[in-house]
Image (cartoon, helix red, strand yellow):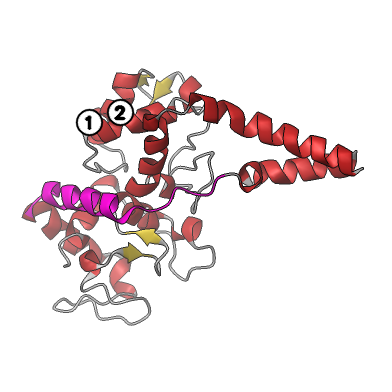
Amino acid sequence: MFRAWCVALISLLAGCGGVSGPAAYDTQEIDRIVQAQRAKSDATDAARRGQAVFLEGPCAMCHTIRGTLAMSRVGPDLTHLASRKTIAAGTLPNTRGHLAGWILNPQNVKPGSRMPPTLLASEDLHALVAYLETLR
Amino acid sequence: MILVLLIALSTVWLAGCSPAKSQASANVERGRALVSWYGCETCHSVPAPSAVRGNVGPPLAGIAKRAYLAGRLPNTPDNMLRWIQDPRQTDPQTLMPELGVTEQDGRDIVAFLYTLR
């Protein structure tokens, strides 16, 4: 009986025994979402503040953005981040929600990733994301 | 023993999946996918099969029965939509970003979230 209970628990944890998997990423829908987000992204003011957040905060310690003072080679070069379809080594679509969540706590997405959680004030996060979205 | 295992498995399968299935309309299914596409689940853990289980904001399990949203809005479908579309209108200090969620996308997401009882 204990064994049966264990199996039941495992299948419950596994999301109903694999009856349905994670929602598949629909490329066309993702493109639609990204385009709407970029069209609405706060124009230059937020992006300018976001660049300061990037350069003066911990991001610049690991990443390069060509044309700025961020020149570290520990993490990926982000010069054309906004042109990428995915982030986190192909794990997530490059939509605003995923990007913000990844920045705040990468360990949820890829446990063991060398990128640490980044604790940001709300205004700084929104500005930073607006800036990153300009990096075509 | 095998029979017991089979019964246990099917009980779990029926208990875990049938209610969600029976409530599923096109909107709920689409809402579930949108939660994944917009990236909600990178911050909020969603009690559904998911590539990522976020732990930045509150988990969404049981949100249908939660009394308040964002610590201040009574939990109604309209308030949930308002919060999803423009979180900073309700809480200027929130980290939750405005994701450009359209009216239709928002309604589908809300429909899905109200299945999380």
Is residue B62 in sight in this rendering? yes
Dot 2, crowdedness within 10 Å: few (<14), some or many (≥20)? many
| Proximity of marks 2 and 1: CB atoms separated by less than 8 Å | yes
**In the rendering, at what x and y percent does residue B74 appear?**
36, 17
Q: Chain letter for mark 1, please.
A: B
Most foreground residue, B8 or B109: B8
What residue lies at 32% left-to-right and 53% top-to-bottom?
A: A100
The magenta segment: A20-43
Residue on which disc 1 sits: B103
Quadrant hosting residue A99: bottom left
Kind of residue sitting beneath label 1: Glu
**Does A75 appear in magenta?**
no
Q: Are marks 2 and 1 on the same chain?
A: yes
Is residue B117 in sight in this rendering? no
Instruction: Please determine whether, in this image, residue A80 is positioned above or below residue A19.
Output: below
Find numbered disc 1 in the image and state the secondary structure of the residue it sits on: helix
Q: Is residue B81 left or right of residue A2?
A: left
Which label is found at residue B107? 2
User: How much space separates mark 2 and mark 1, taking CA atoms?
Assistant: 6 Å
Q: From this viewpoint, which residue is outermost toward the left?
A: A44
Q: Chain letter for mark 2, please.
A: B
What residue lies at 17% left-to-right and 47% top-to-bottom?
A: A36
Find numbered disc 2 in the image and state the secondary structure of the residue it sits on: helix
